[in-house]
Amino acid sequence: MKDFLKKVFVFALTASINVVATQAQTYEEISGRGVNIISTAVPFIDIAPDSRGGAMGNTGVASTPDMFSMHWNPAKFAFIGSDAGAAISYTPWLRKLVNDINMYYLTGYKRIDDMQVIAASVRYFTLGEIHYRSGPEDGGYQVKPNEFAIDAAYSRLLSEKFSGSVAFRYIRSDMNFKEDDSMKPGNSFAADLAFYFRTPTNLIGSDSDLSAGINISNIGSKISYDGVNKEFIPTNMRLGIALDTEIDPYNKLNVNVDINKLLVPTPGFSPSDANAEDYRQKYNNISVTKAMFQSFSDAPGGFEEELQEINVSVGLEYWYVDQFAIRAGYFHEHENKGNRKLFTAGIGLKFNMMTLDASYIIPVVQDSPLANTIRFSLGFDLGQFSKN
């Protein structure tokens, strides 16, 4: 049973399930009146890699800069205080189903001067060992599917309160289809465009900073495993605001709100599609640029379904003497679009040159495969190392 669940999950990761699932449905069934999940290839690149953002309901596009800004909003690096830093994070994924799916994330940044910062990261997602066999008498064979992404970013201050960033990404997805010569590893190149704004304010009568951010990520080529069917990668738009308040010299409170939307086509036949093959060809022929703009108005259920495609995240972070943090958050996804409704929590410890964070997911929905997900992150302030 364990191998069966893992096998299902592996093929769910390939975006071919998007077309296969749609072929079994009619126009009436995919009309915005029920479950209509948007599937993409390589969804692992949208998994929150760090404990801080993960503990705050998957918020981070407008939060205070940290070593994991590469994932949430690389434009934040221009405002980071240290000259250099590096961090690593480990996430055991879907532990309620299987015990050997893991994500590893390594990131680092270096300040060039007062205006410019460069950063890079590597993300590796392993699905463990899977035993494939065609029938009860078949001995089968073992495979180790894996996916990874390599990123590089340049961030620059555009004014005293505003920064921008561009990032580039190489993605590789290897499902290890050893007995099918027509199936090959998928590759994609993508880019991010991000901006960050931060200004002092007296909004609630205390010394505060108000921040806003936007990150349009994974703008890139489709992935194909067979050279024929091409699947979108998860091009994504994340918007957010944050308020960081110093209550007194010992206590600080950060409040973050993000909204998130995939910029890929919503599944759905139209009356002009004679059959599923017509729909598949039409889907394959949609360009990435067209899909990004079309994604705001292509849902079969109209404006109501478009609103269902927006995920909302809220996160809180409390710091005591800049050394101990308590975090909590909530992530909401509509039941027709995946039904991820999650409470999150976590803690953080900050030493002179090191940070240690952990987070935990508490699903609202019973029997969620994300139950008991824990993340661990470790960061090093290399600027402090060089000073010492």
Image: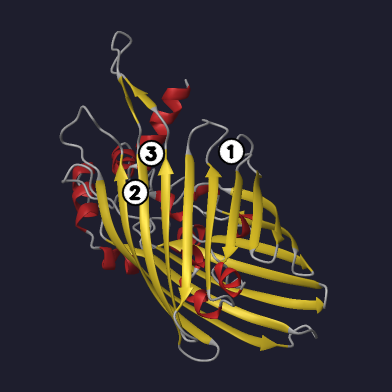
Q: Are marks 2 and 1 in contact (CB under 8 Å)?
A: no
Q: Residue 116 sits in which quadrant?
A: bottom left
Residue in the picture at 31% in, 19% down: 133
For label 1, count other residues whose C-alpha is less than 10 Å away and answer few (under 14), some (14-19) or many (20+).
some
Left or right relative to 239: residue 15: left
Residue in the picture at 56% in, 76% down: 80
Relative vertical location of residue 144 with respect to residue 237 in this rendering, above or below: above
Residue in the picture at 77% in, 78% down: 246
Measured as percent of width and height from the top left, residue 288 is found at: 27, 63
Q: Give whichever of 122, 37 is nearer the camera.
A: 122
Residue type (three-letter) at the residue carrying disc 1: Ser
Relative vertical location of residue 320 with respect to residue 81 in this rendering, above or below: above
Give the structural element (helix, strand or loop) at label 1.
loop
How many tags in the picture? 3
Give the structural element (helix, strand or loop) at label 2.
loop
- Mark 1 lies on residue: 368
Q: Earlier in the sequence, mark 2 or mark 3?
A: 3
Report the residue that reaches farthest toward the bottom: 159
Is residue 91 visible in the rendered structure shown here?
yes
Residue in the picture at 40% in, 31% down: 8
- Mark 3 lies on residue: 12
For label 3, count other residues whose C-alpha is less than 10 Å away and answer few (under 14), some (14-19) or many (20+).
some
Q: Earlier in the sequence, mark 2 or mark 1?
A: 2
